[in-house]
């Protein structure tokens, strides 16, 4: 199937639903929504404006609503759940995995969450409360408490009988976890070995010690890196005493990776990773106005620097024409370095031992690109304005600004991280301020000293 065909297949349900909404054909809408996978239904809801979501949500079969909620982003999910009463919430979450229920409950007001928890049976409530007790962005907040464990001294025949007695296994179970008599983690027993090896062998004969347990306080970002590095399908989560408390599966890690990718992209514009594309105007204004205000302050700073040289610009109008080139070149070069550094941080590649090497490398790249493009821009400037001195001035300012951009692109995210500030969220604004101020200062300062 071509990319165009795939895109058409994705858009077709949305087009069909939109047509049914316009014509008021609710029976057709109900059939369409009932026929889709919950993830597809979630995608449809996220692709609709708020008023149309409110029409579609009650039409979704009640037994599917919980799964649909588990696939929807936090922002859209919160809006849908505000119109649900406690009984509906209890019904929607009763058949979900504990980790999915915990994700949904965290979007509810405290008193509603307690009411939903009270309505659950004791065992289910304890499982969810054990997840809610940990921060959402840690292994404890990401894990599912449905775990199948076996002892190392029993035979595979006993394991098979135990599995038959259990009946259904938790979703995405590729291995059983081996524990000692104190329930401390020892290793994994892949299901492939259970069914392929001699039943007389003991678990200790065929178990694997290659998969390390994940500490319950490990960040979800580090969990995702471990899954990626070791190609894991699932991994056990242990407390400080090495007791198994849950497991993390690949479907949860995929969500983390997706959220991190969205966070990196949207944070540079001051938006959250769960930003609703079709959020109401008032909510969108509130969220974006703060970031625009911060940007305005930095723009005033750059304008103030330009204002210091207003006399110089009046005498040489060509300077006003060429200023955007200096700022633009520095901004692009700095953004390249900044993006590279933030990516290295996200992948856990940057540390105290290699930061200086990276700084030296980026300064060398910035200086080299500065000289290359300084020559090209100087030649264009000389032919354009017929002034060798103006061409030399442009070239010098470009070199200085590209070196400053490389320096800022490396140091800004490192310093922000040390102060506990997300580099992806505020690094871009600070970088633009630096490149604008340094570029204008160098360009107009040299012009004042040597040309005007």
Image: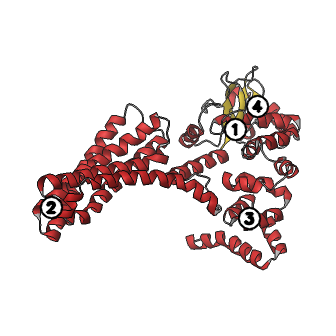
Indicate the quadrant where residue 4 lies: bottom right
Q: How far apart are marks 1 and 2 (CA)?
A: 63 Å
Residue 131's spot in the image, x, y percent? 73, 36
Q: Nearer the viewer, mark 1 or mark 2?
A: 2
Instruction: Please say if the residues under marks 1 and 4 sit with CB atoms less than 8 Å apart.
Output: no
Which residue is labeled 3 in the image?
A: 53
Which badge, 1 or 2, is on the more N-terminal residue?
Answer: 1
In this rendering, would 342 be left or right of 262?
left
What whole-number distance in Å separates the C-alpha atoms at marks 4 and 3? 43 Å
The residue sitting at 65% across, 62% down in the picture is 280
Q: Which of 52 and 179 is in front in this view?
A: 52
Sequence-first tag of 2 and 3? 3
**Left/right of residue 95 with respect to residue 374 in the rendered view:** right
Residue 383 location, quadrant = bottom left
Front tag of 3 and 1? 3
Whether residue 421 sits left or right of residue 404 in the image: it is right
Query: In this figure, which residue is indicated by the disc labeled 2?
Result: 390
For label 1, the residue is: 143
Q: Answer with mark 2 or mark 4, whichever residue precedes in sequence.
A: 4
Numbered disc 2: secondary structure: helix
Would you call the spot at circle 3 few (<14 residues within 10 Å), some (14-19), or many (20 or more)? Answer: some
Q: Mark 4 points at which residue?
A: 149
């Amino acid at each position: 199937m071509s990319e165009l065909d795939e895109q058409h297949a994705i858009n077709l349900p949305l087009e069909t639903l939109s047509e049914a909404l316009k014509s008021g054909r609710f029976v057709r809408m109900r059939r369409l929504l009932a026929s889709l996978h919950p993830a597809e239904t979630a995608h449809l809801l996220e692709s609709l404006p708020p008023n149309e979501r409110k029409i579609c949500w009650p039409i979704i079969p009640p037994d599917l609503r919980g799964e649909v909620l588990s696939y929807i982003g936090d922002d859209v999910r919160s809006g849908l759940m505000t119109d649900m009463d406690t009984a509906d919430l209890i019904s929607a979450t009763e058949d979900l995995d504990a980790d999915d229920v915990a994700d949904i409950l965290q979007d509810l007001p405290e008193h509603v969450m307690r009411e939903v928890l009270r309505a659950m049976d004791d065992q289910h409530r304890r499982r969810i409360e054990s997840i809610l007790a940990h921060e959402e962005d840690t292994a404890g907040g990401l894990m599912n408490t449905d775990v199948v464990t076996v002892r190392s001294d029993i035979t595979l025949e006993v394991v098979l009988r135990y599995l038959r007695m259990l009946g259904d296994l938790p979703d995405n179970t590729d291995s059983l976890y081996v524990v000692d008599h104190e329930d401390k983690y020892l290793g994994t027993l892949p299901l492939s070995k259970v069914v392929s090896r001699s039943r007389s062998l003991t678990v200790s004969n065929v178990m694997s010690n290659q998969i390390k347990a994940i500490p319950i306080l490990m960040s979800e970002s580090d969990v995702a890196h471990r899954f990626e590095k070791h190609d894991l399908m699932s991994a056990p989560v242990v407390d400080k005493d090495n007791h198994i408390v849950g497991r993390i599966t690949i479907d949860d890690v995929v969500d983390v990776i997706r959220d991190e990718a969205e966070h990196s992209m949207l944070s540079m514009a001051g938006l959250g990773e769960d930003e609703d594309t079709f959020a109401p105007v008032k909510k969108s204004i509130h969220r974006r106005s703060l970031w625009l205000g911060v940007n305005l302050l930095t723009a005033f700073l750059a304008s103030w620097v330009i204002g210091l040289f207003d006399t110089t610009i009046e005498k040489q109008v060509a300077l006003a024409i060429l200023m955007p080139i200096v700022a633009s070149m520095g901004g692009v070069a700095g953004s390249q370095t900044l993006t590279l550094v933030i990516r290295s941080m996200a992948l856990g590649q940057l540390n105290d031992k290699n930061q200086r090497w990276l700084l030296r490398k980026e300064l060398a790249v910035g200086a080299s690109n500065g000289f290359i493009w300084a020559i090209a821009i100087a030649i264009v400037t000389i032919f354009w304005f017929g002034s060798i001195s103006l061409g030399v001035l442009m070239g010098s300012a470009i070199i200085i600004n590209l070196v400053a951009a490389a320096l800022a692109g490396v140091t800004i995210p490192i310093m922000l991280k040390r102060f506990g500030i997300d580099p992806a969220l505020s690094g871009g604004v600070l970088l633009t301020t630096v490149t604008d101020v340094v570029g204008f200062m160098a360009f107009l300062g040299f012009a004042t000293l040597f040309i005007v």
